Image (cartoon, helix red, strand yellow):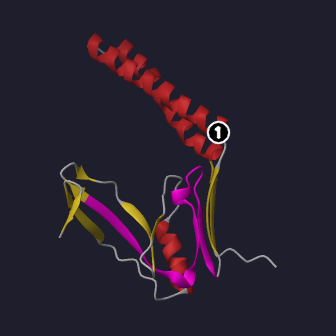
Amino acid sequence: MTEEYLYHFKKTRKKRANLFIRMGVGCLVYIAILYLVGNFTDVPKNIHSIILIVLSLSSALLFYIAWWHIKNPATYEAYITNKTLSVSYPENESWTFKVPIEDIEKIEQRQNHSSGGKTILKVGIVMKNSDFHEIVMDYGNSVNKMFKILNSINPEITFPKNVKTGYYLFGNKVK
């Protein structure tokens, strides 16, 4: 008997490529508008050229990223059953995990500050043994929706909205 998914999010790189294709087409539309505006108004030629170059390079880059996503197929998947939470991130073992829901303590947001500035905000689950499993949201997964399902299964799981901040100076933790 297979377990029923209470939450299931799945996205392939091929499907994600659609976003980059739409943005690339958007750049091409802006280039067409730029030509129309250039014909009917007095836009300085240097500004016109700079905008044209930037939009052209952006469009080419976006189409290349879409092509890469299509040529390198992989699937991001996150699901919750009555007993487990599983996240499978393509080609990255440190962001892939499967854990029992009964061992989850909370969902937490973390960020470090150091002399180099702030790190990117990390969101993940904290286990009862203090292990932290990051849930990467590159593919559009919603941690809030996951929390609602996890909380309905185990009401003891919390998701504080404040960010747990760590401070570092020369690589050493402060505070």
Mark 1, Cα crowd under 10 Å, few <14 / some 14-19 / many 20+, is few
Which residue is at the front of the view, 64 or 112? Answer: 112
Which residue is at the front of the view, 148 or 103? Answer: 103
Above or below, 53 against 66 in this view is above
Q: Is the magenta stretch mostly helix, strand or loop?
A: strand
Give the percent coordinates (x, y) of residue 170.
19, 53
Give the percent coordinates (x, y) of residue 168.
21, 59
Q: Is residue 52 left or right of residue 83?
A: left
Residue numbers of the magenta segment: 83-112
- Please identify the quarter of the rendering in which residue 152 is found: bottom right
Which residue is at the front of the view, 38 or 89? Answer: 89
Q: Is residue 151 magenta?
A: no
Above or below, 79 against 155 in this view is above
- Read off the residue under disc 1: 72
Q: Is residue 90 magenta?
A: yes
Give the percent coordinates (x, y) of residue 4.
72, 77
Q: Residue drawn at (78%, 76%), measured in percent from left and top?
A: 2
Looking at the image, which residue sits at the far bottom? 155
- Please identify the quarter of the rendering in which residue 34 is found: top left
- Which quadrant of the figure contains the C terminus? bottom left
- Please identify the quarter of the rendering in which residue 98 is found: bottom right
Looking at the image, which residue sits at the far right? 1
| Number of marks present in the image shown | 1
Q: Residue drawn at (48%, 28%), measured in percent from left and top?
A: 61
Above or below, 154 against 141 in this view is below
Above or below, 43 against 73 in this view is above
Q: Residue drawn at (26%, 66%), measured in percent from left and top?
A: 165
Mark 1: which amino acid? Asn
- Which quadrant of the figure contains the N terminus? bottom right
Give the percent coordinates (x, y) of residue 149.
55, 78
Judging from the image, what secondary structure is the residue with disc 1 in?
loop
Which residue is at the front of the view, 97 or 140? Answer: 97
